[in-house]
Amino acid sequence: LRYDDIGSFFSVPFHIYPATSPYASPLKSDLERSLDSRRNPLFGSEGKGRRRVITAHRGRKPVGRIVPHTHGASNELYAEHRACFGYFDCIDDIEVARALLGAAEDFAREERCTVIAGNFNLTAMQQMGVVTEGFESAPYSDMVWNPPHIPRLLEQCGFDSCFPARTYEFDLRTFDPQMLLKQKIRDRLEDSSLRWEELAAREFKTALEKIRIILNDGFQNNPMFVPLSSAEILFQAKDLAHVIDPSITTLVHDDAGPAGVVLSMPDLNPMFRAMRSRLGLSAPLHFIRYRMTRKRAVIVFASVAQRQQNNGLNGAMLYRVTRAMQQRGYESVGITWVGDENIASIRQTERLGARRLHRIHLYQKPVSAS
């Protein structure tokens, strides 16, 4: 095992997964930045977290990786002693899996945690889960993907599945946004007290603070959610200004302030796969080609302030966004994870004709004292 070898860490999936797999890596520069404990607020005084970057090697070839980490603010909020692991990728070899997961468990013991769970790359508001069904389906941006041997290896190493969830995909070529137009949604679309705007790139930093207010209010009762600080949301999302399509986003204000948001973006994964997630000399050409041919979008999140919940605003936002996607020529849209316990959202999503893309679970294991 090696520690803090970011170059090898980034290269693992390119060595162990075939080029034809649906896996799409984040940009190398983004991965380095995210795992930098000096720069990422998750590991600073606000997030109160720690992390360890681990790769497994056979000879000179990297064959696996994992990042055990803690989110101190989450443990304080939920009165837990939980460690997490993320970015668990390895060859189909139980010895490699045991070495990586064993090192993650050692980290958890050092941090005095009683359980370890993952994948969290790096929080529940980012990529989360282990794919357990739908391996043939290409993930959208902000979705995880792994081959079938990953959940099997986790189970062989004593991890149990929990927190089932699913991702979805709408075919925009056949989807009719008019299906959303119940009376209360029409009322919100015609409500003169609401002000609608797009997330313009030139004002994105200012918009992020409004988004943070809506997320922290609207997601307050969501499982595993930890309120975001201004530094955290700026760190995680400021670079989206370069890639978002403002016309498929919406930010809504009412008389009390920011009230609702849908953050959508073009699916970047096809471009990342084509450029092998590196910003080389050919990157501008890849970006131009991607802008001309993009057909997939993803809804990263939608949130409504509690004072506007259950009155049709969420449906009104989705109506405007999906219509805009169709007008812009997108053919499909992905929806990041929805927990099985969120029965109302699942019923609404499936009633509107979305198909399940992936089944995902978290995997957890008690950690015994050393």
Image (tube, grey):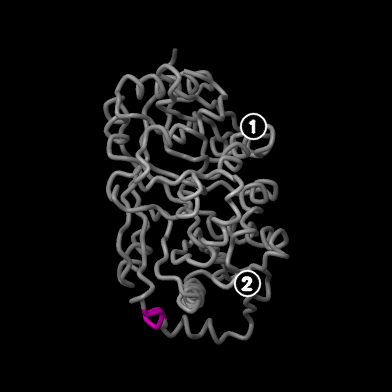
The secondary structure type at the circle numbered 2 is loop
- Residue at the farthest top position: 370
Q: Nearer the viewer, residue 31 or 217?
A: 31
185 in relation to 23, above or below? below
Q: Where's residue 173, x and y in %?
A: 36, 75
Residue at 35% from the left image edge and 24% from the top image edge: 97
The C terminus - image quarter: top left
Quarter of the image for residue 183 reads: bottom left
Q: Which numbered dot is residue 198?
A: 2
Residue at 63% from the left image edge and 57% from the top image edge: 212
How far apart, in angstroms, are the residues tagged by discs 1 and 2? 33 Å
Query: Tag 1: Cα neighbours inside 10 Å, few (<14), some, or many (≥20)?
Result: some
Q: Where's residue 65, x and y in %?
A: 45, 28
Q: Where's residue 243, x and y in %?
A: 59, 59
Horizontal arrangement in the rendering, residue 52 relative to residue 345 (left or right)? right
Q: Magenta span: helix, strand or loop, mainly?
A: helix
Q: Is residue 177 magenta?
A: yes
Range of magenta residues: 176-180
Which residue position is annotated with label 1?
Answer: 37
Tag 2: residue type? Answer: Glu
Q: Is residue 21 magenta?
A: no
Q: Where's residue 82, x and y in %?
A: 48, 31
Tag 1: residue type? Answer: Ser
Q: Nearer the viewer, residue 203 or 352?
A: 203
Residue at 37% from the left image edge and 33% from the top image edge: 16
The secondary structure type at the circle numbered 1 is loop
